[in-house]
Amino acid sequence: MASTSLVLPAVAIAAAAGAARRHPISFSSHRSHSGFVRATRLRRERPLVAVSAAASPAPASASSLDALIFDCDGVILESEHLHRQAYNDAFAHFGVRCQPDAADPLYWDEAFYDELQNQIGGGKPKMRWYFGENGWPSSKIFETPPSTDADKEKLVDIIQDWKTERYKEIIKSGTVEPRPGVLRLMDEVKGAGIKLAVCSAATKSSVIMCLENLIGLERFNGLDCFLAGDDVKQKKPDPSIYVTAAKKLGVETKNCLVVEDSVIGLLAAKGAGMSCIITYTSSTANQDFKDAIATYPDLSNVRLEDLKLLLQETLVTG
């Protein structure tokens, strides 16, 4: 079976050069369950970093933590399985078939989606890449595969819009909760007068709905900056969203600390000149986070004072 490779955008890699040196990552096209070949993922996992606020303080000249910026999916909530469910429901609803003789609509299984979502940020880019590699599909939207750029974009837009509404329904069901430690850390940050932001590559309406339901209206309205995929032209790993956030917050990028869960987000943060900590999920645990300043399974035992000390030490030794 012929295979194709996905390579992270060169502009994003260039932006992170020196801070995140890597070879392009590739994986085979997902044409069928039996034919899918999983990519060899980087297995090096950085040991958890334990930081004590009682450690020797950094010199007074060290810069401070001025803003803490959270990603949403995978950081505030474990959501990738919910996104996958919503995509598959959308493919079934519109009868999306990349192979005309396929008996069933397109279905992204867990193993494939783990690879896909850890390589490409944003829903529309995921579909554009997949259809570009596996053939643009027939569907209830277009009986024959779209051939013009305009029709291709219309197909992606319609599927994404339906998927977003389905995802909202899942979140509103009340079965989803924030990851451990998130709300407590957010409250610590606001209480200390440090700026708080959320930057997500996902569709704005779905992120707003997630935040309103999971962190509550008071915390959401208290954010000093909120950006979603709709607000920037390039998705992560491009650093645009974090560069934009720093400008809106009125702080230097070096004084920002980002909380991410994947290499894609780490590259975006590093490309923007920001330090980054990782709270990995089951689907990202085996990624190479050597360029993060700390790696945690969740935020349960992470305190604001720990993060302030981490950033100060990073700036001093950096």
Image (cartoon, grey):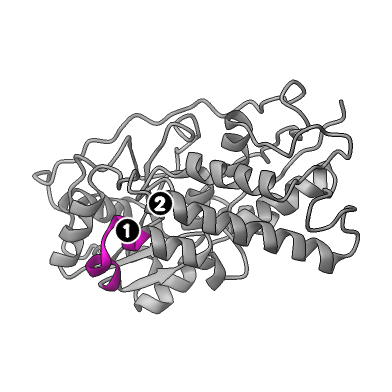
Q: Earlier in the sequence, mark 1 or mark 2?
A: 2
Q: Quadrant of the N terminus?
A: top right
Residue at 70 percent of width and 36 percent of height:
26
Q: Amino acid at mark 2?
A: Ile
Q: Is residue 199 visible?
A: no
Q: Which residue is mark 2?
A: 171
Neighbour tally class for label 2: few under 14, some 14-19, many 20 plus, Cα within 10 Å: some
Majority secondary structure of magenta residues: helix
Asked if residue 274 lies left or right of residue 95, the reply is left
- Give the magenta-colored segment's residue range: 211-221
Residue at 40 percent of width and 62 percent of height:
209
For residue 99, which quarter of the picture?
A: top right
Badge 1 vs badge 2, beta-carbon distance below 8 Å: yes
Q: Is residue 40 visible?
A: yes
Neighbour tally class for label 1: few under 14, some 14-19, many 20 plus, Cα within 10 Å: some
Element at badge 2?
Answer: helix
Give residue 95's position: percent from left, percent from top: 75, 46
Residue at 42 percent of width and 77 percent of height:
247
* Depth order, front residue of 109/255: 109
